[in-house]
Image (cartoon, coloured by chain):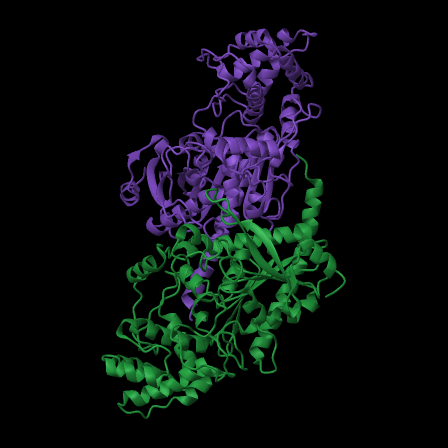
Chain colours: A purple, B green
C-alpha cells in the first residue's frame, strides 16, 4: 500500500482489507443495462490493488472476471501483478454478475429465467463499463487513465469483446485462451476434442489409444449391475453407479481428460485441481496397453489417472463424480450460460479424437436446457452481437493461445491486422501466460508475455496522443 | 425492378409492392436481444428496393429507421436513391421497433414499462444487426456485401452507433444531423436554444427580439380568463386555453420555433409541416417590432407565424396546440425514449436565446417521466454505452451537420480522426443532405454529398481488402 491508500479507501468505501494486498469494494449497477422493463440494481464486487499505481494518470489493469468467485482468478493471474510495477498500474479485478458474491438476486434459482435471465456476457460487460466509468470519474488521477483489460478463457472473451464493444472505455485487451470462435458456423464441432487428443498424444500414440479403448470397456462393463458395482468399487466412487447416471458419468470422465489438457502446466499448480507439473505426461506415464481384452485391467489402469486428478494431495476419501474438483468455479452459472448464449458445439468421432463417438445434436441440447433451466438456447447470439472472426473493424487486442489447451480450437490463431495480434504458445496450456512467472516457464510463454507488454506500452502511448487531441477538440468545440 | 426482383421477392417473402419502387417485408427477431428473462419475438417491417443493385456483392445502403413510420423517412431520404445507381446498391429501410407497424406488443401502453421497456436504441440496433445478418445469409450475392448505414437525426445517431457497436456488420456510416453529444455532461443545456435563436437571427436581430418579447406578453395576457379567451380566439385555437395548459402551451410554441429552424430548407417541403422555402425567412418577414406595449398587437403579429407553420396549405380550420402538424412521427414513443435513455438536457435563459427562461431541472423532469411512463430516466446510459465524444476507437463515420439546425448543437462538428469526419453545411437545416437533390440546394450541401459519396467509395474499397484477407485467414485457420 502506498500513500494513496487511505484516500482511495475512503473514496471507494472499502469494506475490508483482502489477501494479496487487495482491497474489496462494491459497486451498484443496473441488473438490465439495455431495457427498462427491469429497473433493479445490485452490488457487484471488485478488488483493487494500488500498491504500484502511478496515481497521476497511470493505467488501470482490469481483469474481466469470468465464471467463478473473483478470488480464484486473482490467485491465478499473477502476470498482471508481475508487470503492474513496470507500468505504474492500478490493478482491478471485477467479479462477474451471478458468480461469487456478486449476486443480483441472492439464492436465485437458475431455472427461473425471469431472474436468472440477466446472466449474459453483454450485461456483464456493461457492468464493467459502468464500474470503470465510475472509477475514472471518482478516483483522483484516474480520469485520463488508459484501461487495459485482461482475462483468461471466458474472461479472455470478455476482455476482447470489452475492447470491441467499448473502445471508449478500453484502450487495449490481453485476451488469453479466449475461444471467441467456438460458436456455431465458425469452428467445426470436432476441433475441441481433437486438440485434447493431440495434447495427450504428445507423449506418444499409446496414451490416447488406451483412453480411446476405455469407452467401449466401460460400456461393456456397465451393461449389468455386477459390472457397475465392480467399477464403483475399483474407482472408489463416493456414490455407486447406476444405469441412469451413465451418460453423466461418461461426460464427467470426458471433462476430466479435457481439464488435464487445459491445466497441463509445466509446474505443480492447483487451478482446477492440485496436480504435478505437466500432468498429462504423468497421467500418460501411468497408462499402458498390455491389457489384451481384459476390460477390468484396462479400467483399473485408467483409475490411476483418475486418482491422479482427483486425489493428488491424498486428501480425498473417495472420487466424487458430481464435481471436477474445484469449488470456486460457478459450474451451475456456467451451465446456464452454456444453455443460453454460450452455446459451443462439440462433437467426437472416436477416430480423430480419443473420445466416445458423440455427434453434436442441437435438438437434444435444447431439450436438456429447457428441462434444466427453462430456457431456449440462442446459438447465434454471440456471433451476432460480437462478430465471430469478423472483428477487423476493431483494434488493440492480443489473443494468446497455448496449443496444449483444448480451447485453442476456438481461439484466434492468426493475426487479423497489425493491432489484432495472435500469439501462439506451443508449449502452453490454458492461459498459462496469465499466471505469474515461474522458473519452469517454457521460453515461448516468456516471449508471449514480452509481446503482450510491448503492445500494452504501444496502446498506452497511442492513448496519450488521442487524449491530447480529444482535449484539443473539446476545448475548441462550439455549437 | 430488375431481373432479380421475382427471386428476391420469393426469398424475402414479400407481402406487397410499395411506393417508390419498394417492396415491404417482415423479419422476426427477439424482443430482448441481451437477456433471457423475456423470450418473446416480434415482426419488424423493412422496405427493399433492388432496382439498382449489383447482385454480385454490391453494397447494401441501410437506413436505420428512427422515431416514426418508416415510410416518412423513405419519403424524405432521396439522397440514398440518388446515389444508389452509382454504387449498384441495394436500398433497405428498416422500421424502428415500437414505431409504425413494427410493434412488439400491438396497442402497448407506453406507461407499462414491462412491455414498453424494450423500446431502446440498443435493442433497435440489435434488430438491425439481426436483419442484416439474415439478409447477407439468405440473399444470393449479398453474403459479402458491404453495408453502409444512413440516418438522420435520431436515425443518424443510430447509423453512427451501429458502426461503433457492430463494425462486423456495418462498414461505414453517414450520420446526418446526429446529436450524439446532446447528453448530460457533454453539451451544455443552453446550446440548443441558442442555435434556434441564431437561425432566426440570420434574418436580422429584430426577429428573435420580437419572439423573445412575446413570452412576457403571453404571461401577462394569460394571467386572467379574459386574456386567455382573447388569445384562443386571436390564434384560432381548436380548444380554448385554460390555465392548467399554459406550460404545455408555451412548450408547444417553443417546439414550433424549433421546428421552423430544423426544417429551414431552401425549397418548399413538408417534412414536419408543409412550408415554403426558407420558412424562417418568411416567418421573420411577418414579424415587426412597432407594437409598443400592446401585447395583443404583438401576439396578433406572432399569429402570422403560427398560421404559416400550421396552415400554409390553408386546409386547417383551426390551430391544434396538441400537435406539431405531423402524424407519422411517433411522438409518444419518442417521449418514452426521452424519459428513459434519450435524456437530452435543454435550458433557456431568454438572453442568449429568444425563449422564456427555463432551467434544466432533472428532478422535475424525472417526476414528470415517472408520472407519464412509470419509468426512471437514465441520463448517463447513452454516454456509458456509446461513449459520447470519445469514439476515436471507432472509424468510418461521416457526421454531417447543417448549422441552421438546432440539433447541430449536439453534433460532431470537428473531425475526430481521418475516418471520423465532420462535414459542416453552413446553409443546411436538419439532415438537408439526406434529402434528394434539388435545384435550390446551396453549394455547401452539394459539396457535403460529394464528400459522403467519396467516403462511401473508400469504405467499400477498404472492405474488399479486408474481405480478401478474411477469406485467406479462414482458409488457413487450423486448430
Give coordinates of residue A171: x percent, y percent.
Answer: 48, 49
Q: Is residue A453 visible?
A: no
Left or right of residue A139: residue B477: right
Residue sitting nearer the eye, B126 or B58: B126
| A418 to the left or right of B363 | right
Q: Quadrant of the N terminus of chain B?
A: bottom right
Between B21 and B445, which is closer to the camera in this rendering? B21
In what quadrant of the picture does the C terminus of chain B appear?
A: top right
Residue B123 lies, in percent from the top left, at 49, 52
Quarter of the image where one finds residue A213: top right
Give the image quarter of residue B357.
bottom left
Instruction: Using the image, determine if residue B326 lies above or below residue A431.
Output: below
The percent position of residue A174, horizontal first and vertical second, equals: 52, 41
Give percent across and percent down for residue A401.
58, 35
Determine the residue positioned at 71% across, 42% down.
B475
Q: Is residue A445 left or right of residue B2?
A: left
Q: At x 27% / y 41%, what residue is drawn?
A: A6
Nearer-the-camera pick, A260 or A110:
A110
Amino acid at each position: 500500500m502506498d500513500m494513496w491508500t487511505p484516500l482511495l479507501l475512503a473514496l471507494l468505501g472499502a469494506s475490508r482489507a483482502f489477501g494479496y494486498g487487495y482491497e474489496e469494494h462494491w459497486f451498484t449497477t443496473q441488473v438490465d443495462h439495455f431495457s427498462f422493463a427491469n429497473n433493479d440494481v445490485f452490488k457487484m464486487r471488485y478488488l483493487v490493488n494500488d500498491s504500484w499505481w502511478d496515481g497521476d494518470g497511470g493505467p488501470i489493469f482490469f481483469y474481466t472476471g469470468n465464471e467463478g468467485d473473483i478470488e480464484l482468478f486473482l490467485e491465478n493471474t499473477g502476470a498482471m501483478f508481475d508487470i503492474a510495477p513496470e507500468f505504474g498500474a492500478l490493478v482491478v479485478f471485477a467479479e462477474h454478475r451471478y458468480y461469487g458474491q456478486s449476486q443480483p438476486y441472492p439464492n436465485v434459482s437458475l431455472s427461473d429465467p425471469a431472474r436468472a435471465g440477466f446472466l449474459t456476457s453483454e450485461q456483464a460487460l456493461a457492468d464493467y463499463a459502468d464500474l470503470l466509468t465510475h472509477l475514472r470519474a471518482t478516483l483522483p488521477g484516474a480520469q485520463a487513465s488508459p484501461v487495459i483489460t485482461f482475462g483468461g478463457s471466458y474472461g479472455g472473451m470478455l476482455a476482447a469483446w470489452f475492447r470491441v464493444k467499448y473502445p471508449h472505455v478500453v484502450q487495449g485487451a490481453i485476451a488469453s485462451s479466449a475461444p471467441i470462435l467456438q460458436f456455431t458456423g465458425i469452428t467445426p464441432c470436432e476441433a475441441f476434442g481433437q486438440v485434447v487428443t493431440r495434447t495427450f498424444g504428445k507423449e506418444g500414440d499409446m496414451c490416447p489409444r488406451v483412453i480411446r479403448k476405455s469407452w467401449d470397456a466401460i460400456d461393456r462393463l456397465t451393461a449389468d449391475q455386477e459390472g457397475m458395482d465392480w467399477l464403483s468399487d475399483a474407482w472408489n466412487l463416493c456414490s455407486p453407479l447406476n444405469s441412469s447416471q451413465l451418460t453423466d458419468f461418461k461426460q464427467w470422465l470426458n471433462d476430466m481428460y479435457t481439464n488435464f489438457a487445459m491445466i497441463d502446466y509445466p509446474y505443480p499448480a492447483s487451478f482446477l485441481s492440485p496436480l504435478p507439473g505437466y500432468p498429462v505426461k504423468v497421467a500418460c506415464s501411468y497408462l499402458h496397453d498390455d491389457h489384451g481384452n481384459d476390460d477390468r485391467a484396462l479400467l483399473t489402469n485408467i483409475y490411476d489417472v483418475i486418482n491422479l486428478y482427483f486425489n493428488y494431495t491424498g486428501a480425498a476419501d473417495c472420487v466424487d463424480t458430481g464435481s471436477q474438483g474445484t469449488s470456486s468455479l460457478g459450474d451451475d452459472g456456467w451451465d446456464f450460460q452454456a444453455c443460453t448464449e454460450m452455446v459451443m458445439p462439440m462433437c467426437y468421432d472416436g477416430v480423430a479424437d480419443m473420445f466416445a463417438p458423440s455427434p453434436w445434436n442441437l435438438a437434444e441440447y435444447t431439450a436438456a436446457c429447457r428441462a434444466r433451466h427453462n430456457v431456449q438456447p440462442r446459438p447465434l447470439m454471440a456471433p451476432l452481437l460480437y462478430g465471430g472472426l469478423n472483428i477487423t473493424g476493431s483494434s488493440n487486442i492480443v489473443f494468446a493461445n497455448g496449443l496444449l489447451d483444448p480451447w485453442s480450437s476456438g481461439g484466434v490463431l492468426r493475426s487479423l491486422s497489425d493491432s489484432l495480434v495472435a500469439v501462439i504458445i506451443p508449449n502452453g496450456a490454458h492461459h498459462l501466460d496469465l499466471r505469474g512467472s515461474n522458473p519452469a516457464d517454457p521460453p515461448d510463454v516468456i516471449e508471449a508475455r514480452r509481446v503482450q507488454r510491448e503492445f500494452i506500452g504501444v496502446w498506452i502511448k497511442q492513448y496519450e496522443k488521442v487524449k491530447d487531441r480529444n482535449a484539443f477538440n473539446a476545448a475548441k468545440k462550439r455549437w
